[in-house]
Image: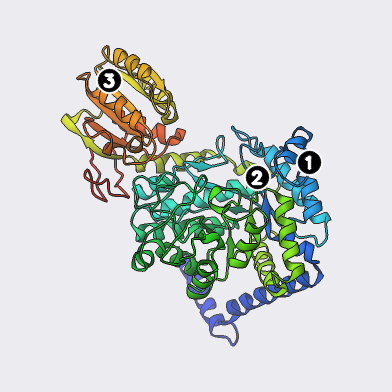
Amino acid sequence: MAFLKRSGLFVVCFALLFSLMPGFRGQAKQDGHWRTRAKERWVSHELKKMTVEEKVGQLFIVHAYGKTPEDPAYAETNIEKGRGGTNFKEIIEKYHIGGVIYFNWSDNISTPVDARQVQQLSNGLQKIALKQKPRIPLFISTDQEGGAVARVLEPGAVFPGNMALAATRSAANAKKAAEIMAVELKSLGINMDFAPDLDVNVNPANPVIGVRSYSENPDLVASLGIAQIAGFQSQNVAATGKHFPGHGDTNVDSHYGLPVIHHDLKTLNHVDLKPFKAAIASGVDAIMTAHIVVPALDGSGLPATLSKKIMTGLLREKLGYDGLIVTDSLDMSGANVLPPGQVPVAAFNAGADILLNPPDVEVAWNAVRNAVKTGEISRKRLDESVARILRVKYERGIVRNPFTSEKSLSYFGTPEHLKAAQKMADESITMVKNENQILPLNQTKKIFVTGPSVANSSRLAGLLKEKGFITENMGTAAAPTQAETATAVGKAQNADVIVAAAYNANTNTAQQAFLRALKKTGKPVVMVSMGNPYDIMGAPDVDANLLAYGNRSVSVQSAAKALTGEINPGGKLPVTIPGYAPFGHGLHY
């Protein structure tokens, strides 16, 4: 012990001595300057070598169908869907694209995940890219927010979504979830994530954000958002804050229409923009645009993605952001307010650096290249965006190490990762109502579990049965039919308690009618909300209400634990449920 104390003192003195030596104090600063100079030299060198066509290619992140770089099964589909080639390889070689995006529906990532297949796809795509001039590796991206929007699922670690994390009120949880998601993404060769969602969800009827948002409170959104940005980027996965300037107060889904945000400048500054300002200050790699009209910022009627006033005037100049600006997917209805060839050019001239997922790759690429040739897009502006793209690829280590090793798959879906995800889901469960102490359920009672299949009602019933409860189950459509309602009411007669899984019932009149019919049986009704937390607005007479904030298996397991008293609900509402519960509300057993 004495030796350890002496040796410890020696280390402290030694460090102190060196810290006082000339030049030592500035070493870290010098190292930072050296890294910056090395990066800028590389960026400048690569820019000088690149043709216009190669620079234009760097602006695009596109999807293609297939499990492999040359998957013959999707050759016709890729042509029919406007991918610009029969497979990834052709598209990379023809258009020099800067990145790809993986989806489940394009068969890049299967469910359950075949980790080796995804890794081999990623490595194969990087090899193809590095054989082309100018040998720049790809951004390989996906949407891995956790919860409702997640492309990488079991056997990987599936985390509850943002609002569930906010219910735990833990920035540490948020950061750890992002770190683990990043580790697993990197093992598959994915180096860019379109997350976190920084929208402030203030509208209970929001059809596209909801539980993807952390909260209605901009400070809570900012706190957890920057924690996740730090988590992703600590593992060298580029993070993307979205959807600027804020998609939290809309009743239109921009995938299918063009929402209008009617906030005034004061509200925009104090609510919608606050998390983005925090993200910028934290050093977020990228910010994604929203296909929304914001008249207070731009009266032209153009969506933010195509608005120079918003993308350049506000984000670049007023907020001082010099990172990557990525458009939301250009195949969404909200972006297609101009002819197809004009949309990517308008988005770029508005201020975007990366043009994500155009509906027709050939049309979009040719439009941008021709705009450069004619001077509609200046060479200087093109170089600025390509330089930003190259900087992030350098900073995230993609240039130095574009490939991922087979050994890294040992980090995918580890017991420790799965345990961490389950613990966070357990901590998120929030109890809004519990009349007559109906919860936790009594094991001697017969339980009838019902509700939409999208709410994972059958899985919930199975878990209760595994825990020794006498259960009967009946799933329904998302909008239960009259016949389904009649059948469910009949089955409920044999039960002591009804457990009704709900999914966004506050905006679904058929679910509301279904829940009213169950309540009229005279049996206690416990509603478990597997989507947005506002269900009780459409079913105020239920006897109890638990919030799981999502229908993924991890959240359903936590809901079953809370129903049976295995865990005590400890979550706090991240939003107000108008007329029913305030922000921060949460009951306990």
Which residue appears at 35% of the width and 28% of the height?
A: 510
Q: Secondary structure at mark 1?
A: loop
Residue furthest to the bottom: 22
Q: Is residue 516 left or right of residue 183?
A: left
Amino acid identity at mark 1: Thr
Q: Is tag 1's residue or tag 3's residue first in the polypeptide sequence?
A: 1
Rounded to the nearest angstrom, the CA distance separating label 1 from label 3 is 58 Å
Q: Are marks 1 and 3 in contact (CB under 8 Å)?
A: no
Image quarter of the C terminus:
top left
* Residue, disc 3: 443
Q: Is residue 338 left or right of residue 177?
A: right
Residue 161 vs 241, above or below: the answer is above
Residue 321 vs 103, above or below: the answer is below
Residue 399 appears anywhere in the view: no
Q: Residues within 10 Å of mark 3 (few under 14, many from 20)?
A: few
Query: Which dot, 1 or 3, sits closer to the camera?
Result: 1
Which residue appears at 60% of the width and 44% of the height?
A: 411
Find residue 86 and name its label: 1
Count every numbered label the image shows and give the total: 3
Query: Which dot, 2 or 1, sits closer to the camera?
Result: 1
Q: Residues within 10 Å of mark 2 (few under 14, many from 20)?
A: many
Asked whether 107 or 402 is in front, the reply is: 107
* Residue, disc 2: 188
Residue furthest to the left: 436
Q: Is tag 2's residue or tag 1's residue first in the polypeptide sequence?
A: 1
Asked whether 514 or 164 is in front, the reply is: 514
